[in-house]
Amino acid sequence: MRTAVFSTKRYDREFLTAANRGAHDLHFLEARLDATTAVLAAGFDAVCAFVNDTLDAAVLAQLAGGGVRVIALRCAGFNNVDLAAAQQHGLAVVRVPAYSPYAVAEHTVGLILALNRNLHRAYNRVREGNFSLDGLLGFDLHGRTAGVIGTGKIGALVAKLLHGFGCEVLAMDPFQNPDCAVFAQYVPRDELLARADIVSLHCPLTPENTHLIDERALSLMKDGVMLINTSRGALIDTLAVIAALKSGKLGYLGLDVYEEEGDIFFEDLSSQIIRDDVFTRLLTFPNVLITGHQAFFTRNALEMIAATTMANLAEFEATGGCANRLGAVAKRN
């Protein structure tokens, strides 16, 4: 199957090629998929896309018109795909519903530890010969209350890890996970926000929870609370968070995602001016730690993503392009 792989980095080529084993004709493109680059997929059977590729109605119409029959997402989230438009054009949509929840969960705890103990600041100080401890004071995680919003595979693992540190763990999810209930107490969202010293987000992005953490939610939280987001950037109202940082309401912020990350993350912009004033404002706070959507980035996860993506294409081909059945995958998981 001829497949156009968009948003390709060196590691994508390495892991997808290894998992493919010559089964499909993969064409790697560095360009992000959007309305201006969709023409590059003309004549291909499949498109392989990533989290910041645009798959709205206009792009999907171009892809279908060019002969594409299946969209293979090499990620779990599908908020960037217009599923109704995909169905209208007879396009199957498949994804990687689970790769390595350990990768994201462990990165989440890494952000918590780094922020709490000021590891990022201490690293820079020591390299400059400054061994002063002033301003690096942290707190024991043991005995603190952590709130986990979204308790799928990743959220449940975060709850387990924080429980292992001796935290009291609160959880919130419309669908309670029995694996998480072993380590956490399910409570209403407002109670979680009011009681937690650390709030960690592990939700898919839906219209209902866009800006889940807004001015109201922040007002319910303790003064000096730590907020962590390794899920989707738009779960957080960034302007409201900046106001909470300036007032001191928010004591720590750890982000692996950002709601306008599409023009920033996964690229080397070190020799350019970042034009996003909101993002650059975040970078001015000493109690903010941002990583560039790397929580998933382990060898284990990349191997699983590549293997599942190739298996999805093989299944689509083996079933003769059964778009209706495979197209439902993104909706079910």
Image (cartoon, helix red, strand yellow):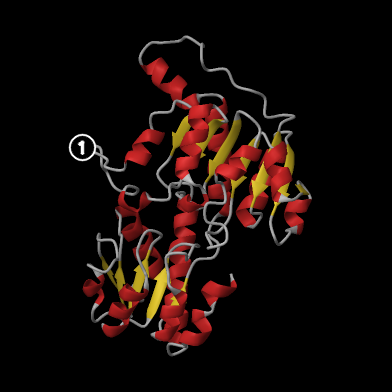
From this view, report whether residue 332 is shown above or below residue 247. below
Q: In this orientation, which residue lies closer to the viewer: 248 or 40?
A: 248
Query: Pointer 1: what residue?
Result: 271
Residue 228 horizontal side relative to residue 40, left or right: right
Residue 225 horizontal side relative to residue 270, left or right: right
Residue 297 horizontal side relative to residue 143, left or right: left
Residue 187: percent from left, percent from top: 76, 49
The quadrant in which the C terminus is found is bottom right
Residue 131, quarter of the rendered image: top left
Residue at image coords 47%, 32%: 288
Residue at image coords 37%, 40%: 279
Residue 251: percent from left, percent from top: 56, 29
From this view, report whether residue 254 is shown above or below residue 21. above
Residue 72: percent from left, percent from top: 41, 72
Mark 1: which secondary structure? loop
Give the amino acid at mark 1: Ser
Mark 1: few, some, or many residues within 10 Å (few <14, many ≥20)? few
Q: In this orientation, which residue lies closer to the viewer: 70 or 145?
A: 145
Residue 290: percent from left, percent from top: 44, 38
Residue 130, quarter of the rendered image: top left
Is residue 160 in view from this perspective?
no
Residue 100 horizontal side relative to residue 3, left or right: right
From this view, report whether residue 186 is shown above or below residue 79. above
Residue at image coords 43%, 50%: 259
Residue at image coords 57%, 17%: 137
Q: In this orientation, which residue lies closer to the viewer: 84 or 151?
A: 84
